[in-house]
Image (cartoon, rainbow, N blue to C red):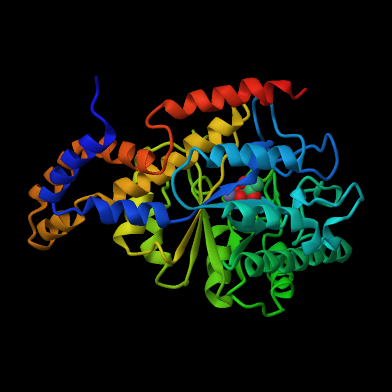
Amino acid sequence: MSKSPTVSYEEARKVYADWGVDTDAAIKTALQTPISMHCWQGDDVGGFENEGQVLGSGLAVTGNYPGKARTADELRADFEKAASLIPGAKRMNLHALYAETGGRKVDRDALEPDHFSTWIDWAKTNGFGLDFNPSYFSHPKADDGFTLSHPDKGIRDFWIAHGKATRHIAAAMGKALGSPCVNNVWIPDGYKDIPADRKSPRDRLRASLDEIFAEDISPDFLLDAVESKLFGIGSESYVVGSHEFYLGYAITRKKVLCLDAGHFHPTEGIADKFSSVLQWVDRLLLHVSRGVRWDSDHVVLVNDDLTATAQELVRGGYLDRVSIGLDFFDASINRIAAWVIGTRSMRKALLAALLDPVDMLRKAEAAGDYTARLAYVEEAKTLPFGAVWDHVCEVENMPVGRGWIDEVKAYEKNVLSKRS
Ligand code: RNT
Ligand code: ZN
């Protein structure tokens, strides 16, 4: 018979102590650090505005695994199931297209906090924080690939009004839940082929954003974020909101900069960027994702990129200055399992980073002993991390190890399989 997680943990604790690591402190911080789980993994970025809505603007979800949430109630139930299998503090990250308008058609420029009151009450009851996003896609006024940088003032104004509306909704969420809501602006605007004018759309985007953010809203309730992208499907040659555009915007306008792990060149990681951009912006939002060959938004796993991301957050002392959000969508596997795998991976990576013997590494580095530094990096990989993680699941009253899979399978059988 295998040892109980607690017995194994006591042994692991001693091993880590020998490396100068306090496992109890690491566990505490790992569990307290909120992870914002994106609502859109639960229904393939569909939302509930109208049935059969087509996902557009370069966003693509592949797969047709049965059992997707069809209503907000189903999405909430699925999210609760996933959350019950993920240790630690959790937030729910909503998009504007998940408004509940009671069957009435309310266009995006007219959305109000009331259309999210059920979400807010639910989040309060369940102890989840809320984050938010204006939705600049899957809408007739986004069909030609431009929104806030559109040459037509009427279309631009519609999307500016949407941006303003979402700031009020996000602030209401932050106020109701006693924790600032991050409202993240991402727009799809760009050209499939080589533009003749790269400047004008960026001029217009800058002006539109300035208009959206003109009203001062307390950072106790709302944190505005902006998300860049290198390319998208249909915007391969030019994206208006590029990294340089938003880096400059965030610095000069004191906004939160969002770094999505899939939005850079395929071999470019985001981890090395934190200690550079945090010299100039106060806060970052991460969209933790896993690109496979391109910005494919695969379910997050503990790979080298995620390990480096978590290590940089911990080593830079940045956990208070960075909001961790997830951004992936996979419809080829059970969607609740996708949430659980991705979010547990993020939590595991955080715990592993907090258990990393960084003091020893730093001492070696300061002494110029790069031999020991490299040796420690490699030796630390076989420390008994699994025993600590199992202990965390046990004390959080969650199934240890792969036990959670049975719970998801049972939910699939009893709930998801009954959805047509
Ligand atoms: C798109 C961006 C954006 C979206 C979500 C749905 O490339 O990553 O964050 O994935 O807002
Ligand atoms: Zn993103």
Depth check, front residue: 96 or 177? 177
Height in image: 283 above or below 236?
Answer: below
- For this view, does 22 lie left or right of residue 366? right
Image spot of residue 328 (x, y percent): 56, 40
- For this view, does 316 lie left or right of residue 154? left
Image spot of residue 173 (x, y percent): 67, 64
Which quadrant, please, contains the C terminus?
top right
Q: Is residue 233 something that shows in the picture?
A: no
Res 79 quadrant in image: top right
Height in image: 350 above or below 397?
Answer: below
Depth check, front residue: 7 or 176? 7
Q: What residue is rendered at 36% in x and 45% in y?
A: 349
Q: What residue is rendered at 36% in x and 38% in y?
A: 394
Depth check, front residue: 254 or 10? 10
Res 304 quadrant in image: top left
Which quadrant, please, contains the N terminus?
top left
Image spot of residue 264 (x, y percent): 50, 49
Res 277 quadrant in image: bottom left
